[in-house]
């Protein structure tokens, strides 16, 4: 980041170097001997890296730091919890389509990012195993933790497990929140188009009041409707459900009351029952007409194939699932907690640089983080 004559900072909006082409790199030739191994210990071609250090990637946590600030200003602990949950989801949004591996920091390397309303310092505190620590502070919150990424290749996919605990503190309320992040998987390493998903469960605990937010990041599995979806609940100290949280970690997170959620379930159940009745009726009619028109075995085979096709995943030719629309993700009386910002138009050529990359200082020194 450059500094002008009047001491105002001019922020950059993209990284200085374009991403290297991977068309000439055979991923299989690199990974064929790495099945079941920890990829953090394997030397990779530089073309598979994006021009960022992992410490810089950690700073992307702070892209939506304003959500934490807003949470700290809420008087109700339930409201604070729902916005902390939104912050936890927002921190993962920048991972979408980020298929390049950041460079491993060297031991003792630090990265510092100073903004108007917060400051964050990251440091590589261990080399074997690789552990990165970070600490962010502002007038309203403290945010810190450590990450020890475990990366394994299963033969078709690469799984990243970001082991470690992250913590948010609100000094005004004397509250501490902790959680661990979900796993990340990059699909179609060998054949097809690469795509990424996050799956698992985040449990956020308010250690002062006992409130808990549980967020389930759904795997695409056999149903495209679950692609990128997040659902969960805010519960009190007695495990009583207070709010329903839902959305997509790539786009937004909303919440609604349990009354509205229960009403939605009843409506969905009624719609599914009507669909089932209609499909059963149509299938019966189809079989009857098929028998009347022809008794050839091929006709029955064709009918069987059509019935089975309804249950196959909705995929493109390159194996990339297609997510359905967001129409069903809009329950009555919902409150928007967070929405993802659009990416720059050139993000496909130059790795996406969130506002957290517009300036910062990287040091290769033997110093400790805050």
Image: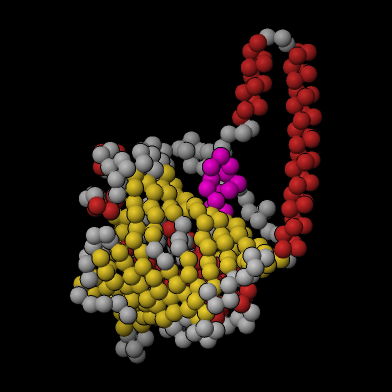
At 52% from the left and 79% from the top, the residue drawn is 175
Question: Would you place residue 4 above or below residue 154 in this image?
Answer: below
Any part of residue 350 in sight: no
> Foreground residue, 125 or 280?
125
- Quadrant of the frame with the C terminus: bottom left
> Is residue 223 covered in magenta?
yes
Q: Where is residue 230? Give x, y as percent.
A: 57, 56
Left or right, 364 with respect to 170, comes to left
In the image, taking residue 278 as reference, residue 310 lies left or right, namely: left
Please state the horizontal and vertical placement of residue 143, each as a whole percent of the image: 43, 75
Q: Which residues are magenta?
A: 218-229
Q: Is residue 61 above or below residue 47?
A: below
Q: Residue at x 58, y 65 (%)?
A: 213
| Dominant secondary structure, magenta | loop
Q: Residue at the spot x=44%, y=47% of the render?
A: 195
Residue 349 drawn in magenta = no
Numbered circles on residues, count = 0
* The residue positioned farthest toward the top in the image shown: 296
Can residue 316 be seen at all in this image of the molecule? yes
Q: Quadrant of residue 94?
A: bottom left
User: On screen, 182 above or below 146?
Assistant: above
Residue 56 position within the rendered picture, expressed as x and y whole percent measured from the top left = 33, 67
- Residue occupying the point 26% across, 77% down: 368
């Amino acid at each position: 980041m450059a500094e002008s004559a009047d001491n105002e900072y001019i922020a950059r909006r993209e990284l200085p170097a374009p991403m290297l082409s991977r068309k000439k790199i055979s991923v299989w030739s690199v990974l064929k001997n790495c099945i079941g191994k920890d990829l953090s210990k394997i030397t990779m071609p530089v073309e598979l890296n994006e021009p960022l250090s992992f410490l810089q990637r950690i700073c992307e946590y702070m892209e939506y730091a304003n959500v934490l600030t807003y949470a700290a200003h809420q008087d109700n602990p339930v409201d604070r919890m729902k916005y902390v949950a939104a912050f936890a989801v927002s921190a993962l949004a920048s991972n979408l389509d980020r298929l390049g591996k950041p460079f491993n920091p060297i031991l003792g390397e630090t990265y510092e990012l100073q903004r108007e309303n917060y400051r964050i310092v990251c440091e590589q505190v261990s080399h074997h195993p690789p552990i990165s620590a970070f600490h962010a502070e502002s007038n309203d919150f403290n945010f810190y933790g450590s990450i020890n990424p475990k990366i394994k290749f299963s033969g078709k996919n690469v799984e990243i497990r970001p082991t470690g605990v992250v913590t948010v503190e609100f000094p005004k309320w004397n509250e501490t929140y902790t959680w661990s992040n979900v796993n990340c998987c990059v699909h179609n390493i060998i054949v097809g188009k690469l795509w990424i998903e996050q799956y698992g469960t985040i449990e956020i605990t308010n250690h002062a009041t006992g409130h808990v937010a549980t967020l389930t990041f759904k795997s695409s599995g056999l149903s495209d409707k679950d692609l990128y979806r997040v659902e969960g609940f805010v519960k009190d100290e007695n495990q009583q459900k207070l709010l329903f949280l839902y959305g997509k970690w790539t786009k937004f997170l909303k919440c609604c009351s349990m009354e509205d959620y229960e009403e939605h379930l009843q409506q969905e159940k009624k719609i599914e029952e009507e669909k089932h009745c209609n499909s059963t009726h149509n299938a019966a009619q189809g079989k009857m007409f098929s028998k009347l028109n022809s008794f050839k075995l091929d006709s029955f085979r064709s009918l069987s194939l059509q019935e089975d096709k309804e249950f196959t995943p909705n995929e493109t030719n390159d194996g990339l699932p297609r997510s359905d629309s967001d129409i069903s993700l809009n329950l009555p009386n919902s409150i928007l907690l967070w929405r993802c910002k659009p990416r720059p138009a050139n993000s496909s050529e130059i790795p996406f640089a969130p506002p957290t990359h517009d300036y910062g200082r990287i040091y290769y020194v033997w110093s400790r983080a805050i």
